[in-house]
Amino acid sequence: MNLGTLRLFKVLLLFLLLQNLYAKVDKIDFNLIKKGQEDNNTLLIVGGIQGDEPGGFMAASLITTHYTIKKGSVWVVPNLNFDSIIKRARGPFGDMNRKFAKLSSNDPDYDAIQRVKSYIEEDNVKMILNLHDGSGFYRKKFIDRLHSPYRWGQSSIIDQVSLDLKKYGNLEEISRRVCGHVNSNLLRDEHAYSMHNTNTRAGDKEMEKTLTYFAINQGKAAFGNEASKELPVVERAYYHILALEEYMRVMGIEFERGFELSPRGIRQALYDDIYISFYDNKIKLPLSQVRSELRYFPVKKDGILNFTPSNPLMTVIKNGDDYAIHYGNVRLANLSPDYLDMEESSDEIKFKIDDKVVNVKFGEIINANRNIFIFDQKDYRVNVIGYVNKEQRNESNIKIDKDEIPEYYSIDKQGEIYRVEFYKEDKFVGMVLVKFSGDFSVASKSDNITSDKM
């Protein structure tokens, strides 16, 4: 075999291997979340096109969970390349933001690209924002290796000065307005934003492949927003949110924000009130302080773990024998399954929490001071995980004090939250969590996110 034939054989072998790999790919689908009232003036926000840029996709997720759109319409794709986000990679199958000009139908990203293109092409969508975290700090003149024209961080990206459109065709003017707003709210002077015109039509072959360039060729105003990778994630998200809110004002979209616009407020919104529910709220897990390993977690015998997250950046992935809960780039916890038959029930359970009697639904979290007492009900068997009573298997009709449950059985790192599980014969019925926090109440269920998943 001569050298030319050997090279051709290697190329063909690589092609066949890639084809085989692509055929086995089972990708995580992304969400489209619609906020506000449908109109002919919709803003489309895209985050997570590259999974190693968490400032962008975290900011996009905040729009879905902590904003009320009072006037206008906002569509959000917070997790476009979900596989990339989970793997903390730019793209497991190549850079997705270089696949909008030409793409083989065999590419694992093909369906996602076609789907997001269809949203861009919708008549009511008038502006598209693609959120990124870029290297260093963009400066028009070279200062040093981190502050130069070759960096992308802290910039508003346009492909050209203007478009011939009835609305929002003045790309440069809008970009400068957004930069001005961000620059009036800087955390430090070094973080200054600048407009960056890539002049894509002048022959930038790489930028011709991007989402924003595809959008402007569909007659849509499109912008990239880049926060610097030199900053902590919450500060990147802060600058993205500043820019996003100004773009909404440009479009006349009115909104209410459910947190203080500061790094501290963003950190609280992103990490303090996060949870995931399983099996139609039979189980609800708060995740802000969850332990990294939870053992004997109830899972249906068929292995299907149905879940509803409080944030679209959350998912559960089978990981060997366990199930891993992911939130953005972070794996929060591994669930070691206890495979069980399950029974449907809408019953309420009668508890005495300290000295007060209350009815509790499955999936709720009880705040208690020192002790709990679960009244015997129907044919339910009660199992307080970590509590040991050698005299009886059913732990109802027993006053149980916090000190009687070893701390390492708590589901949280602070040793405050414990599982109370209910069974009918050997079938799992539901779970209630008890948080020994020093006061009495029942935590209400928050609304879960709603999405169009296609």
Image: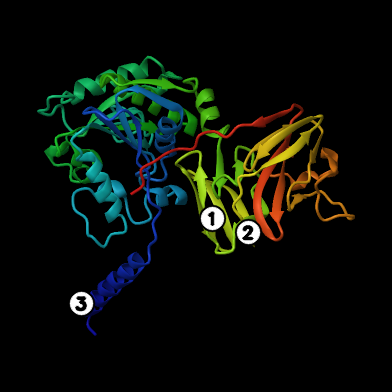
* Tally of marks: 3
Helix, strand or loop under label 2: strand
Where residue 425 appears, as percent x and y from the top left, is: 72, 59
Query: Can residue 135 be seen from the camera position used here?
Result: yes
- Write down the quadrant of residue 237 in the picture: top left
Category of crowding for the residue at label 1, using alpha-carbon neighbours closer than 10 angstroms: few (below 14), some (14–19), many (at least 20) = some
Is 231 above or below relative to 277?
Answer: above
Binning the other alpha carbons within 10 Å of mark 2 as few (below 14), some (14 to 19) or many (20 upward) gives some
Question: What residue is rendered at 23% in x and 60% in y?
Answer: 105
Q: Nearer the viewer, residue 4 or 390?
A: 390
Most distant residue in the top direction: 184
* Residue bearing the label numbered 3: 4
Mark seen at residue 305: 1
The quadrant in which the N terminus is found is bottom left
Q: Residue at x 28, y 54 (%)?
A: 111
Comparing marks 3 and 2, which lies closer to the viewer? 2
Q: Closer to the N terminus: mark 3 or mark 2?
A: 3
In the image: residue 103, left or right of residue 242: left
Side of 85 relative to 150 (left or right): right
Q: Give, as a three-letter code, the residue at label 2.
A: Pro
- The answer to whether residue 338 is left or right of residue 66 is right
Which residue in the structure is indicated by mark 2?
A: 337
Q: Nearer the viewer, mark 3 or mark 1?
A: 1
Query: Where residue 352 appears, x then y in whole percent?
Result: 78, 35
**As displayed, is residue 324 above or below residue 154?**
below
**Of label 3 and label 1, which has the lower sequence position?**
3
The span from disc 3 to disc 1 (Cα, nearest Å) is 52 Å
Residue 157: quadrant of the picture: top left
Amino acid type, callout 1: Leu
